[in-house]
Image (cartoon, grey):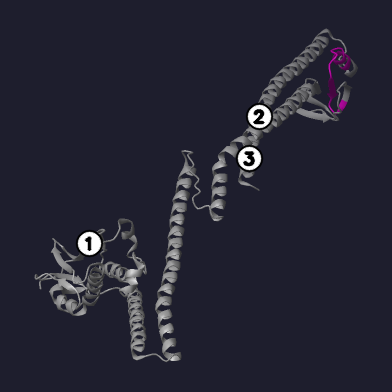
């Protein structure tokens, strides 16, 4: 049974019970009042009859006339009333509409039903061992009560029918938010993640609707994140496959030349140099991939690092770069090896973007609680539309130039992961044709 049907049945049950109990109480209360009034009137009429009979018997006795059983019976029959008279256990007369085998006790009343007839019997004791019973018809009163009850039941049926129709409309209106919630959840489960209930009922159902919509927003955001992750993984795999394909093609091609053809020494050196160059590219690619994967495996333990100690190592790692480093000591919280790797990648990217022997400057900008590392070059720059994507794995603005210089598109992605491991991020500012500046903000360490 649906919720609306349950609601209608419950309301009809409450309405019928309350209407029926209230109506029956009023009907039977009114019937009781009428019955009590008629009972008093009948008792008074019975008492009057007893008084008249008793008075006439006394008058006959005073005049010395016969007051035998027949005389008394004739006196009573002359009243033309429904009565019965006993002297002792002997019945003298009986005009009762119902059977009464014995006199009633003095001052008692009995209701007798015979078919559809209802009769009230009143009994009293008279002088001379006489017992009088009077009968009064109550059939009309009970018939009126039954007629009123039938009319009430008919009225109740009409009221319940009208109430059922009204309740059906109300139940439909009340359960509309539930239908909206059901339909919306079905649409969301079918893939319509942007569907919302947006109910405004001003009650608890509106709160449920808001909670449902918030849940749907969270689900949609989660699904969007998952779809974005899937897309990134697909892009990553596609780019990774492409990056492997290019050097492998060169290596296999030159190796096949060396294997199957007789070449002069110059061609052999050229083929070997190409194989060596592409092999180094694959080695660099694998090392950076391993570094990317290793950064996400465990939490980084940060220690105090004096950046001045990194400059000689940075110069040794980038011997062909016209590198400018600061003279001051700056201590930061970090991992020395990872910070050196970050600086190497930024410096090498800056050198590749500029002209040969173009300077690449590394600066330390101390703040109150932080130190900002800044790497600036004067190379070709990055278009504004590309800045947000240059930290994606394998993404290269100029693929042909990057591959020619041995790039893999993983340098800035690795730098971004290293910065994130230090609780920071890469901030890239660039103007095409003027150069690029990359900043990383680190927490300041202890005294050097």
Element marked by disc 2: helix
Foreground residue, 260 or 204? Answer: 260
Q: Is residue 258 above or below residue 285?
A: below
| Sequence order check, earlier mark of 2 and 1 | 2
Q: Which mark is residue 23?
A: 2
Q: Residue at x 90, y 17 (%)?
A: 70
Element marked by disc 3: helix
Q: Which residues are magenta?
A: 73-90
**Res. 345 image quadrant:** bottom left
Answer few, some or many: residues within 10 Å of disc 2's Cα (few below 14, many 20 plus, some between 14 and 19).
some
On the image, numbered disc 1 is attached to which residue?
A: 435
From mark 2 to mark 3, how far is it between C-alphas? Answer: 22 Å
| Sequence order check, earlier mark of 3 and 1 | 3
Figure disc tally: 3
On the image, numbered disc 3 is attached to which residue?
A: 8
Expressed as whole percent of the image width and height from the top left, the position of residue 385 reads 33, 56
Element marked by disc 1: strand
Foreground residue, 104 or 341? Answer: 341
Q: Residue at x 57, y 52 (%)?
A: 186
Q: Is residue 347 above or below residue 102?
A: below
């Amino acid at each position: 049974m649906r919720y609306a049907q349950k609601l209608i049945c419950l309301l009809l049950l409450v309405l019928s019970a309350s209407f029926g109990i209230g109506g029956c109480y009023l009907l039977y209360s009114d019937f009781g009042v009428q019955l009590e009034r008629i009972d008093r009137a009948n008792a008074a009429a019975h008492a009057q009859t007893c008084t008249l009979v008793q008075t006439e018997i006394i008058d006959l006795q005073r005049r010395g006339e016969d007051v035998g059983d027949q005389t008394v019976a004739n006196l009573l029959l002359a009243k033309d009333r429904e009565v019965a008279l006993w002297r002792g256990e002997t019945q003298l007369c009986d005009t009762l509409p119902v059977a009464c085998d014995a006199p009633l006790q003095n001052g008692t009343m009995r209701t007798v039903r015979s078919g559809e007839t209802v009769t009230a019997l009143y009994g009293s004791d008279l002088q001379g061992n006489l017992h009088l019973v009077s009968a009064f018809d109550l059939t009309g009163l009970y018939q009126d009560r039954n007629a009123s009850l039938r009319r009430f039941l008919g009225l109740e049926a009409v009221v319940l029918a009208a109430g059922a129709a009204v309740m059906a409309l109300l139940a439909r209106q009340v359960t509309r938010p539930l239908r909206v919630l059901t339909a919306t959840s079905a649409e969301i489960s079918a893939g319509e993640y942007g569907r919302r209930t947006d109910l405004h009922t001003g009650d608890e159902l509106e709160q449920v609707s808001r909670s449902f919509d918030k849940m749907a927003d969270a689900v949609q955001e989660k699904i969007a994140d998952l779809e974005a992750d899937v897309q990134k993984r697909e892009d990553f795999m596609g780019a990774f496959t492409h990056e492997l394909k290019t050097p492998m093609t060169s290596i296999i091609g030159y190796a096949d030349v060396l294997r199957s053809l007789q070449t002069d020494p110059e061609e052999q050196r050229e083929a070997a140099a190409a194989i060596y160059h592409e092999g180094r590219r694959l080695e660099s690619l694998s090392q950076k991939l391993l570094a990317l994967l290793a950064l996400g495996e465990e939490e980084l333990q940060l220690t105090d690092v004096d950046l001045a100690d990194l400059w000689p190592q940075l110069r040794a790692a980038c011997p062909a770069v016209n590198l400018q480093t600061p003279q001051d000591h700056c201590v930061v919280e970090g991992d020395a090896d990872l910070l050196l790797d970050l600086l190497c990648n930024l410096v090498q990217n800056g050198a590749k973007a500029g002209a040969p022997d173009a300077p690449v400057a590394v600066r330390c900008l101390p703040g109150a609680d932080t130190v900002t590392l800044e790497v600036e070059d004067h190379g070709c720059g990055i278009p504004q539309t590309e800045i947000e994507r240059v930290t994606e794995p394998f993404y290269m603005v100029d693929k042909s130039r990057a591959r020619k210089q041995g790039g893999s598109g993983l340098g800035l992605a690795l730098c971004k992961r290293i910065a994130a491991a230090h609780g920071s991020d890469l901030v890239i500012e660039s103007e095409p044709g003027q150069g690029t500046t990359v900043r990383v903000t680190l927490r300041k360490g202890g005294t050097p």
